[in-house]
Amino acid sequence: MGSETSSTPSSYQLLAEEVVQLRMKVAYLEERCRELEGMVSKNSQNSSKPPSSDGYQKPNESDSPQDDSTNGKNSDSQQESPTPKSLRQSSDNKAGGQKGHKGNCLKSVDNPDYVVYHTLLECHDYHTSLLDVEPLKHIER
């Protein structure tokens, strides 16, 4: 009987070998995790990657972790609600000039520097000449 137990490994030896294998696998996975986290944390701001490789994610406000108690806000609630587009509040006034506001415009003068005459040579509806026709209206601007 003593020779049979020495040739077959005991449950202790099997467990010890499995522990060694699992520790080697954990060490490998931890190293791989560090590599992947290093790759994810790189962007165009902190590495030589081009900006086009950043993707559509918004950049973080700060790369250093802060304590939530000092910040006053929970980081999860910041991600859930989007920031408002504008902080301006609407007023009760309608768009455009308001009643009672005196408008300013360019006033005409008695003696202008130059005068531009816009004459029509032809009627755009009937294509007849308007050279011999007296104008019905005169508009000054």
Image (cartoon, rainbow, N blue to C red):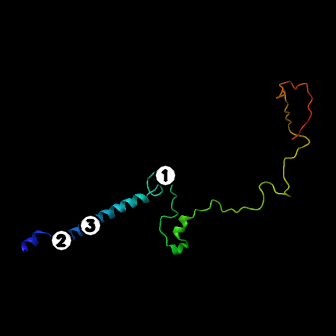
Of callouts 3 and 2, the N-terminal one: 2
Q: Is residue 95 above or below residue 18?
A: above
Of callouts 2 and 1, the N-terminal one: 2
Name the residue at 11% across, 72% down: 5
As drawn, the label of residue 51 is 1
Q: Label 1 neighbourhood size at 10 Å, few (<14), some (14-19), many (20+)?
A: few
Percent x, y of residue 60: 51, 62
Q: Which residue does the numbered mark 2 point to in the structure image?
A: 13
C-alpha distance separating marks 2 and 1? 54 Å
Which residue ends up furthest to the front in the rendered image? Answer: 1
Of callouts 3 and 1, the N-terminal one: 3
C-alpha distance separating marks 3 and 1? 40 Å
Name the residue type under label 3: Leu
As drawn, the label of residue 22 is 3
Name the residue at 14% across, 69% down: 9
Name the residue type under label 2: Gln
Name the residue type under label 1: Pro
Q: Is residue 55 above or below residue 111?
A: below
- Image quarter of residue 21: bottom left
In the rendered image, the quadrant that contains the N terminus is bottom left
Percent x, y of residue 115: 86, 36
Q: Element under label 1?
A: helix
